[in-house]
Amino acid sequence: MTTQPGETLQTLFEREVAEHLVDVLQLEVTPEEIVPDAPLFVEGLGLDSIDALEVALMISRVYNVTLSSDDPDSRRVFSSLRGLATHVANVRGKAGSAG
Amino acid sequence: MRSAPASDFQPETADLSLVFSPDRSVFSHPDGTVSTGHDLLRAAHRTAALLPDAPIVSLCQDVWHFTVLFLATILRGQSVLLSSDRTPERLGQLAASRNAVCVTLKGDSATEELPPGTLTLPAPDGSGTDHPDNPVILFDREVATVFTSGSTGQPMAYAKKWGALVIRSIVARELLDPEETASSLTGTVPPYHMYGFETLVCQAVHTRSLATTGPTTYPADWRKMLELTTAPRILITTPLQMRALLRADLDIPPIARIVSAAAPLGEDLARRTEEALHTVVTEIYGATEIGSIAIRRTTVEPVWKLYDTVDLHDDSVTVSAPGAPDIELADLVEQRDARHFRLIGRRNDMVKIAARRASLSMLNTILTNLPGVEDGAFVPPNTDDGHTARMQVLAVAPGVSAAGILASLRKQIDPVFLPRTITFVEAMPRNSVGKLTAGALREFATTVMEGQIIGEISFPADHPAFPGHFPGQPVVPGALLLDCGLELAGLNPTKIDQVKFLRPVRPEETLRFRLRQENERRTLTARMPDHPGAPLALRAVIRTQSD
């Protein structure tokens, strides 16, 4: 998960999250077409608050990570595929080491 | 014929003070503190001193911020403009057209992008121990104007009088929270939409109710608000969010009652919610023009009960209520008696997504006015698909890119009505007089999106697959369904990228298969034409050897 910003290749985990995004939102792109650093909302895939809710449910179901507005990270979570994947990986990492 | 109100509530006895009974608790906050009516009044007086002498377009998303700004605007002698269209450009245009100022309060989680010229005032400050002035507001004073997209495409303005809002709050409270013990209200809906404005802001200000404040984006946010407030709890939400709450499967405190509005609530979702959360689901019927007017418990009664003081007349077409102009209902209703009615369907071409409304003809006019677009149409979502509702757009526009059209549409219409992409076609299926009928458009859209029909099948009740799958509850096994579809399509796949079984198929149910090929990607879908809206049962993305 140690990718540099600006890197355009998806990591394996980003690819996996991208597959779930395409599936849950029924996007008209293939997972590999989602640019990791591109914004998910408005200019990028054009997602909105309804999609945010769908994505939050998917992240909770698949990764057992609960998104909440209290989280200081919450603004960054939906900035890009990379932002989302990194957040999920970090929270899971913490949960793993704590348990 | 005007029917007599059934209630013995006397509207003229209503307390028209700015805040009802200010000694009580009015809001509970995410940090665990509570604001009384006096705190609210102090904060409103302080904010009022900073306001310009102009109407206010309120950008606040938080119900506490919103309420302070609303009352401050009234204290300033002005009124607040409410629009559920949150596009910064549109909010800026609305303010300009009414000589109003866009205002938000510091710390509000509002839109990242604010309209130009937005005034950001300090966060609400309710500190102090005095009892600030709590003036009685004149019944006929216009305190808010609500905007909604009319069928012409131009926003329509509906003025709300103080007395009318107070009376509606009082009659609504008796139906929403009928128990002796006052409930706390937690809302997942924004205060600038008529539903949230009436059911959270006005309830907190005009009745005994306490409302919870805080962010409302995620189910985890709703849980936090419910945890911070006191029982009995009422959750003010929408069908979309109710479904999300069930799917999130969170450990939440008991909810005595769930109130749903903004979109029709399916009986099945209402029942599942009542069972899973041990609660009562109440549905409100209303419209931006007139507010909430009727109520029912979805699982037990198909019939709606009119709020006291609200009446239907002129063959159930017109609604009247004290202090509000008569309005024509957007829905067809069938009256059962003076106080009860059944909903029959939509009267006009309005589409509704996520509590926002738009007229199809307006959307189509915007689309076909774009440079390079020769013809085209929006196709409203099929809400029976069980998926997030999305518009489809078909367009005849040689030489224009989908991204270009999307970018232009984004500037002019609310994002909830934006399609994922633009599907280009050679011609629209207009009839001999150039008219595009709803039926022809939907059939055409399905063919374009999912391909031509390749066949129909159904499985007889004595099919050998049923006894084991599952005993007593026969369902067509997914693998069998997929095999039949592949055979109809004449495909011998080497790789199936994605398969989704979206709905159980039972014996004798007809499946209509379609196949779409786009570059290397083949998509096989099966719909169930005998069900309302022909819901999807199967969707598979396939690659074959030759790809």
Image (cartoon, helix red, strand yellow):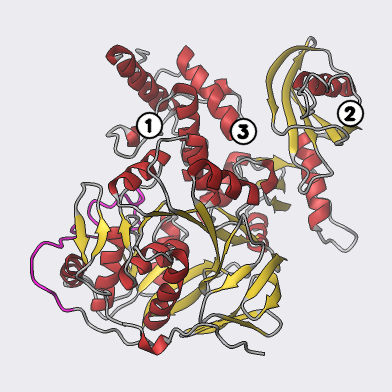
Q: Is residue A49 above or below residue B247?
A: below
Task: Report the predominant secondary structure element of the magenta stretch.
Answer: loop
**Direction from residue B148 to residue B129 in the image, left or right:** left
Question: Element under label 3?
Answer: loop
Q: Amino acid at mark 2?
A: Phe
Question: Element under label 1?
Answer: helix
**Direction from residue B462 to residue B154 in the image, left or right:** left
Mark linked to residue A77 = 1
Residue at 83% across / 52% down in the picture?
A: B440
Numbered disc in front, either 2 or 1: 2
Q: Which residue is mark 3?
A: A26
Q: Position of residue B439 (x, y in %)?
A: 82, 54
Total labels: the figure holds: 3
Between marks 2 and 3, how big is the CA–CA gap? Answer: 28 Å
Q: Position of residue B249 (x, y in %)?
A: 47, 34
**Direction from residue B71 to residue B493 in the image, left or right:** right
Q: Residue furthest left?
A: B129
Mark linked to residue B309 = none
Mark linked to residue B459 = 2
Chain part drawn in magenta: B105-133
State whether discs 2 and 3 lie on one chain.
no
Q: Label 1: few (<14), some or many (≥20) within 10 Å?
A: some
Between marks 2 and 1, how big is the CA–CA gap? Answer: 46 Å
Q: Amino acid at mark 1?
A: Val
The chain carrying label 1 is A
Q: Nearer the viewer, residue A96 or A46?
A: A96
Q: Is residue A33 above or below residue B115?
A: above
